[in-house]
Image: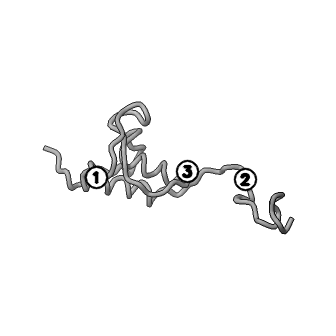
Amino acid sequence: MTNLSTPNIVIAGLPRHGSPQDRGSADAYYGRPCKPHYFVGDTYKSPRIEEPFMTIAQIKEYLYGYENEDDSKDWGVSDWPPHAENHPHSEEA
């Protein structure tokens, strides 16, 4: 029987795509807010489970993924958001 309060954190290798740890890592990587959730199967192709319906262990898995992501998406923009003084619609421009 699975213990619902013990998180299943993957240290070596990658967690299952869509798992709480995977979604936490993805949210951090893409700069999204911390909002625990996961997908039952493949991401965006299966039911999404929100925090109120997650076990404590699943929330811990999500938070582990979120807090331990050490990379971030390079959006290719060096000055975002643009400073007001450089924005063409700014009163200061």
**Left or right: residue 39 compared with residue 57:** right
Distance (Cα) linking label 2 and label 3: 14 Å
Between disc 1 and disc 3, the foreground one is 1
| Residue 71, picture quadrant | bottom right
| Kind of residue sitting beneath label 2 | Val
Mark number for residue 30?
3
Q: Which residue is under mark 2?
A: 77
What amino acid type should be assigned to the residue bearing mark 1?
A: Pro
* Residue shown at the point (42%, 46%) measured from the top left: 22
Q: Position of residue 15 (x, y in %)?
A: 39, 43
Give the residue displayed 48% in from the left and 57% down from the top: 33
How many labels were placed on the picture?
3
Label 2 vs 3, first from the N-terminus? 3
Q: Quadrant of residue 79?
A: bottom right
- Relative to 80, 17 lies left or right: left
Q: Secondary structure at mark 1?
A: helix
The amino acid on which the numbered mark 3 sits, given as a three-letter code, is Tyr
- Where is mark 1, residue-wise? 52
Q: Position of residue 12 (x, y in %)?
A: 40, 48
Across and down, in percent, residue 28 comes to: 50, 55
